[in-house]
Amino acid sequence: MFRLGAILFPLMILAMILKQKGPVWKFLRIGATSPDTARRADSAELTAPDRLHLEDLVKRGVLVALDDGRYYVDLAVHRRRRRMLVFLLAVVAMALVAGVLLLWPTPEA
């Protein structure tokens, strides 16, 4: 029973990380995916912590800032970063599961 929990725990962490909804998700929700549909941060209803991440997301290329103060999501960059995150987290989860299974003491018969 404990082995199952040891296996599921890293997978649940992976699922929680993937479900986080930050500024990118909020811009996607309002349809800001091109220069024509770009929106201001106020219209995305960003929280204070979300606003702190805007500059970082622009540096990473996920969000594109226009000169007039509007932003939009670069879908190609967003998808590529998302796939890389899923891949890395899956590798970490598999390594944790393998480590738990290899190091778990077996009962003496």
Image: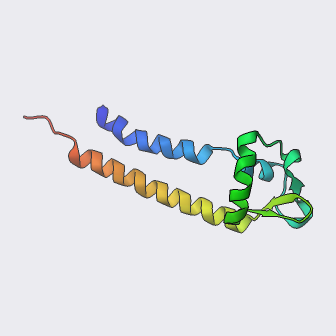
Residue 101 lies, with reference to residue 72, above or below; the image says: above
Q: Which image quarter: residue 38? A: bottom right
Left or right: where does residue 45 sit relative to residue 89?
right
Quadrant of residue 37 within the rendered picture? bottom right
Q: Position of residue 27 (x, y in %)?
A: 80, 52
Instruction: Kindly identify the residue that appears in the image at 75 percent across and 40 percent down.
Output: 48
**Tell me, what colour scheme is on the image?**
rainbow
The residue closer to the viewer here, 88 or 11, is: 88
Report the residue that reaches farthest toward the top: 1
Residue 16 position in % (x across, y down): 55, 41
Instruction: Name the residue rendered at 30%, 32% in the picture.
Output: 2
Image vertical order of residue 20 relative to residue 77, above or below: above
Please state which of residues 79 and 53 is positioned toward the viewer in this rendering. Answer: 53
Vertical side of 109 occupied by 77: above or below: below
Image quadrant in which the C terminus is located: top left
Q: Quadrant of the N terminus?
A: top left
Q: Position of residue 44 (x, y in %)?
A: 84, 46
Residue occupying the point 42% across, 58% down: 91
Front residue (pair 81, 63): 63
Q: Is residue 79 above or below residue 31?
A: below
Kindly identify the residue that appears in the image at 73 percent across and 57 percent down: 55
Give percent across and percent down for residue 66.
86, 65
